[in-house]
Image (cartoon, rainbow, N blue to C red):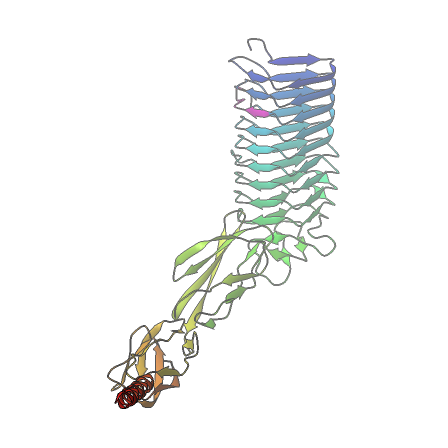
């Protein structure tokens, strides 16, 4: 746009601007500017490279700024905001992506009843959200990161009766949340870490603010500072979680306010476990740590220093699977991760033993052989550590192979043989059983009476024939 503004609204009522791509040029003003207007909706627009604010409303009422992308608005000599609302009333700023603008991501001044929720506010040059002289505002569920020049993730000045809830705030050069001249705020369920200064700084004068259920870690010399008076760092038995809390007692908040969190917890706790032992080959073996985290990331197990992979973690006690290891002694290290990436570790010892003998896959049974029949009988056994050897007691008559095949080593005379079979595992545990091998006597084939009958029959027939011949001759004479 070669005009001062990409889009200019004045005295507009019930207007909607959606799905526009609005790029500035040198010397341009705001990407979208509205004044004295009512019921304006901005949806799914992209606004970038303007020399003034990306989106700017002045003296307007009822604005919905939804799912816009606002970036690289960074002209000189002014510091420029992604979204700036001044001297207005009632706005909803939701689901926007606001990055790399040369001042604040979102600035609200003199505007009550503003809801800022679900925005991605990253790498703007000053504050992520700057709220001044604006009451009854809600800043909730925003992702606010990487703001520089000694500024804060969220700044609240001279504003009362609002909520800062459920935001993730990290890597600001100075404070995660900074408040001054503010009262009656609820500051809860925020995850605040890796900021250059305190995670939360309550400056003078602040009073009657409730701060609880926040996870504050790895930020500045002090995680929390309170220079005000009458702020409450716990509510109905729930305090805050701190990365430097040492698990016992109350938590003293630094600063002149001399406030105390009476119900603190640790942001991340790895816990400890006892050395463990289990029988090789068994299943369902675990090592349990009483770990905890309000905002957990993952955990992983290291076995003798070798990572076993990250596992999703719900922040409660961890029962880590240690099945499947061969006999030996292992150094087991549990590493737990906060959602921020910070970690704690604890090491213990696991011993896997083999105290059990092999077991028969099928129990060997007695065998019967006919005379001069060869023996070939496959015997099977199993062991978690593997089978080392097979043996029989009568090696003169029998042999057994490395795989458990029982055979005769020589001719077996008829009779009964008691054969003891022993199988031994890799750790010299054995099991034995005795079976009977019976070799039957030789059986001769029976005589065949058919030949004799035929012979007798033949002689008889001859006799009869002779008799008949003799009689005929006598008659003939």
Which image quarter holds the N terminus?
top right
Q: Which residue lies at the image location 38% right of the left edge and 74% below the top edge?
A: 380
Image check: 290 left or right of 210?
A: left
Question: Is residue 442 at all visible to an observer of this figure?
Answer: no
Asked whether residue 81 is drawn in magenta, I would say no
Q: Which residue lies at the image location 70% right of the left edge and 25% below the top edge?
A: 64
Question: Is residue 145 at all visible to an observer of this figure?
Answer: yes
Which image quarter holds the C terminus?
bottom left
Image check: 417 left or right of 21?
A: left
Asked whether residue 71 is drawn in magenta, I would say yes
Residue numbers of the magenta segment: 69-77
In this view, the residue in front, 338 or 377, is 377
Image check: 378 left or right of 192?
A: left
Q: Is residue 223 above or below residue 470?
A: above
Q: Is residue 463 above or below residue 272?
A: below
Residue with the most extreme front position: 477
Classified by dominant secondary structure, the portion drawn in magenta counts as loop
- Tell me residue 78's x, y (percent): 56, 21
Q: Is residue 387 above or below residue 198?
A: below
In this view, the residue in front, 198 or 9, is 9
Q: Quadrant of residue 8?
A: top right
Q: Is residue 408 above or below residue 206?
A: below
- Tell me residue 329's x, y (percent): 39, 70
- Tell me residue 199's x, y (percent): 58, 45
- Tell me residue 246's x, y (percent): 57, 60
Residue with the most extreme top position: 2
Q: How many numbered marks, from 0 up?
A: 0
């Amino acid at each position: 746009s070669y005009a001062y503004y990409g889009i200019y609204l004045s005295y507009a009522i019930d207007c909607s601007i959606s799905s526009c791509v609005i790029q500035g040029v040198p010397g341009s003003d705001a990407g979208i500017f509205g004044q004295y207007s009512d019921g304006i909706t901005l949806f799914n627009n992209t606004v970038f490279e303007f020399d003034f604010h990306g989106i700017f409303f002045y003296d307007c009422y009822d604005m919905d700024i939804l799912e816009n992308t606002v970036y690289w608005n960074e002209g000189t000599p002014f510091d420029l905001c992604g979204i700036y609302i001044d001297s207005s009333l009632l706005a909803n700023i939701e689901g926007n992506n606001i990055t790399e603008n040369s001042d604040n991501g979102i600035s609200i001044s003199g505007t009550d009843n503003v809801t800022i929720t679900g925005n991605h506010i990253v790498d703007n040059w000053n504050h992520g959200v700057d709220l001044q002289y604006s009451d009854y505002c809600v800043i909730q569920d925003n992702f606010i990161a990487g703001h520089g020049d000694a500024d804060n993730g969220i700044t609240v000045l001279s504003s009362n009766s609002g909520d800062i809830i459920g935001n993730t705030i990290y890597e600001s050069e100075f404070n995660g949340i900074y408040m001054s001249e503010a009262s009656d705020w609820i500051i809860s369920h925020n995850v605040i870490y890796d900021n250059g200064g305190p995670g939360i700084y309550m400056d003078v004068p602040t009073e009657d603010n409730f701060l609880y259920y926040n996870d504050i870690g790895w930020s500045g010399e002090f995680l929390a500072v309170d220079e005000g008076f009458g702020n409450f760092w716990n509510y109905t038995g729930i305090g805050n979680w701190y990365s430097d809390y040492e698990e016992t007692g109350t938590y003293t908040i630094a600063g002149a306010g001399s406030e105390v969190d009476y119900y603190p917890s640790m942001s991340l706790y790895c816990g400890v476990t006892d050395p463990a032992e289990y029988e090789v080959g068994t299943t369902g073996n675990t090592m349990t740590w009483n770990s905890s985290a309000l905002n957990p990331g993952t955990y992983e197990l290291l076995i003798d220093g070798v990572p076993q992979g990250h596992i999703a973690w719900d922040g409660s006690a961890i029962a880590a699977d240690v099945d499947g290891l061969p006999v030996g002694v292992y150094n087991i290290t549990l590493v737990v991760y906060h959602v921020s990436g910070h970690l704690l570790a604890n090491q213990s010892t696991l011993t896997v033993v083999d105290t059990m003998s092999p077991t028969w896959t099928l129990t060997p049974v007695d065998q019967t052989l006919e005379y001069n029949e060869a023996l070939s009988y496959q015997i099977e056994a199993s062991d978690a550590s593997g089978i080392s050897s097979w043996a029989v007691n009568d090696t003169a008559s029998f042999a057994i192979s490395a795989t458990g095949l029982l055979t005769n080593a020589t001719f077996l005379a008829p009779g009964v043989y008691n054969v003891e079979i022993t199988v031994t595992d890799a750790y010299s545990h054995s099991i034995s059983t005795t079976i009977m091998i019976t070799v039957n006597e030789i059986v001769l084939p029976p005589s065949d009476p058919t030949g004799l009958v035929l012979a007798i029959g033949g002689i008889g027939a001859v006799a009869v024939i002779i008799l008949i011949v003799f009689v005929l001759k006598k008659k003939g004479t």
